[in-house]
């Protein structure tokens, strides 16, 4: 009977250790899993933040490219505007000169080629180019 009690107490001790160990193991496992889950969530958050920053950087790079192209295009348009202004100014001067020549020619026109009254005499009128 003592042997039976000894066996039963050993068995009860083993069973209680197993149950207690299981509970303790479950608690330890829960703490470890919780830490692991936090680490995973933190890692996912870091990856998500890194992805967002990468997208932001990509968008910023694209915006800089657009801005550079816009600035280059604006500079080209500015150069074209300066060139157009130069040409228009030159054409205005030519028109003014032509109008002045025509006005001046009104006083020097004669259909008779050998007219002695022509001023200046035939072939001597010279247009001065101002500009």
Image (cartoon, rainbow, N blue to C red):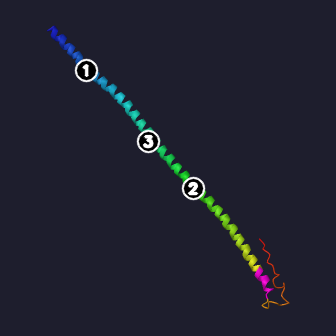
Q: Which of the 4 image quarters holds residue 75?
A: bottom right
Label 3 secondary element: helix
Q: Identify the residue at image location x=28%, y=21%.
A: 21
Q: Bin the neighbour count of mark 1 within 10 Å (Cα to Cα): few under 14, some 14-19, many 20 and up.
A: few
Circle 1 or circle 3, nearest the eye: 3
- Residue name at image x 55 percent, y 52 percent: 65
- Locate residue 8, reporting x and y percent: 18, 14
Left or right, 4 with respect to 62, comes to left
Q: Which mark is residue 18?
A: 1
Residue at 22% of width from left, 19% of height from top?
A: 15
Mark positioned earlier in the residue sequence (2 or 3): 3
**Magenta range:** 101-109
Which quadrant: the N terminus? top left
Direction top: furthest residue: 2
Q: Is residue 37 above or below residue 120?
A: above
Cα–Cα gap, marks 2 and 3: 31 Å
Closer to the N terminus: mark 2 or mark 1? Answer: 1
Please provide percent x and percent y for residue 84.
Answer: 66, 67
Q: Position of residue 51 (x, y in %)?
A: 45, 43
Residue 26 sits in which quadrant? top left
* In the rendered image, the vertical position of residue 10 relative to residue 54, given as above or below: above
Q: Is residue 63 left or right of residue 119?
A: left
Question: The residue tagged with tag 2: helix, strand or loop?
Answer: helix
């Amino acid at each position: 009977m003592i042997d039976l009690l000894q066996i039963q107490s050993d068995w009860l001790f083993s069973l209680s250790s197993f149950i207690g160990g299981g509970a303790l193991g479950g608690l330890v496992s829960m703490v470890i899993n919780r830490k692991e889950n936090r680490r995973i969530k933190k890692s996912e958050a870091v990856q998500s933040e890194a992805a967002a920053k990468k997208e932001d950087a990509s968008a910023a790079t694209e915006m800089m490219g657009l801005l550079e192209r816009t600035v280059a295009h604006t500079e080209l348009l500015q150069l074209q505007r300066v060139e157009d202004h130069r040409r228009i100014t030159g054409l205005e001067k030519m028109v003014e000169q032509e109008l002045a020549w025509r006005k001046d020619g009104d006083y020097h026109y004669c259909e008779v080629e050998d007219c002695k009254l022509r001023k200046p005499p035939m072939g001597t009128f010279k247009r001065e180019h101002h500009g």
